Amino acid sequence: MASPPPAAQHLRDLVRLRRVRDRIDREYAQPLDVEALARGAHMSAGHLSREFKQAFGESPYSYLMTRRIERAMALLRHGELSVTEVCFAVGCSSLGTFSTRFAELVGMPPSVYKAEQTRATEGIPACVAKQVTKPVRNREAPATEPDLA
């Protein structure tokens, strides 16, 4: 049996990668690991990681953590849950890892974010607050003017 043309295989891989990304978006609060995601996509973990990063610009784990941090930001803005409760609600099992990744993505610890954003987004519709408070990875941040001094 002949193998499919490279373009057709690439399209099939993209469909599988989008399904993995959609699964992460839906099940971000569940325990997910690359091996389980790869099994669901009928790929090896290494192949999934390489292809996912090539297609979406970040590893599956990094994408998962970004989704979790985005959801954590929304929960913290509402101010009803503690940082620890938010950590576990978004699927993180370690408060230390959660706080570290949160600070990397958002630029401040979750407790500071909660205190500042609860007041800052008061009265703003949730859909607008979500858009203006979306985390930006340092490598994605807009370039600043070079210092000419």
Image (cartoon, rainbow, N blue to C red):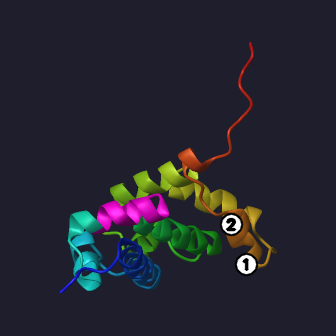
Residue type of the residue flagged with mark 2: Thr
Answer yes or no: is residue 94 visible.
no
The magenta segment: 48-61
Q: Residue at x 56, y 74 (%)?
A: 75
Q: Position of residue 82 (x, y in %)?
A: 49, 70
Residue placed most toward the observer, 140 or 122 = 140
Residue 115 lies left or right of residue 90; in this view the side is: right
Label disc, if present, on residue 7 of the rendered structure: none
Name which of mark 1 and mark 2 comes first in the sequence: 2
Indicate the quadrant where residue 58 lies. Answer: bottom left
Residue indicated by mark 2: 118
- Please identify the residue farthest to the left as the structure is shown: 1
Q: Are marks 1 and 2 in contact (CB under 8 Å)?
A: no
- Please identify the residue farthest to the right as the structure is shown: 123
Residue type of the residue flagged with mark 1: Cys
Classify 66 as above or below 85.
above
Disc 2, SS: helix
Determine the main secondary structure of the stretch shown in magenta: helix
Answer yes or no: is residue 55 visible.
yes
Is 55 colored magenta in this rendering? yes
Residue indicated by mark 1: 127
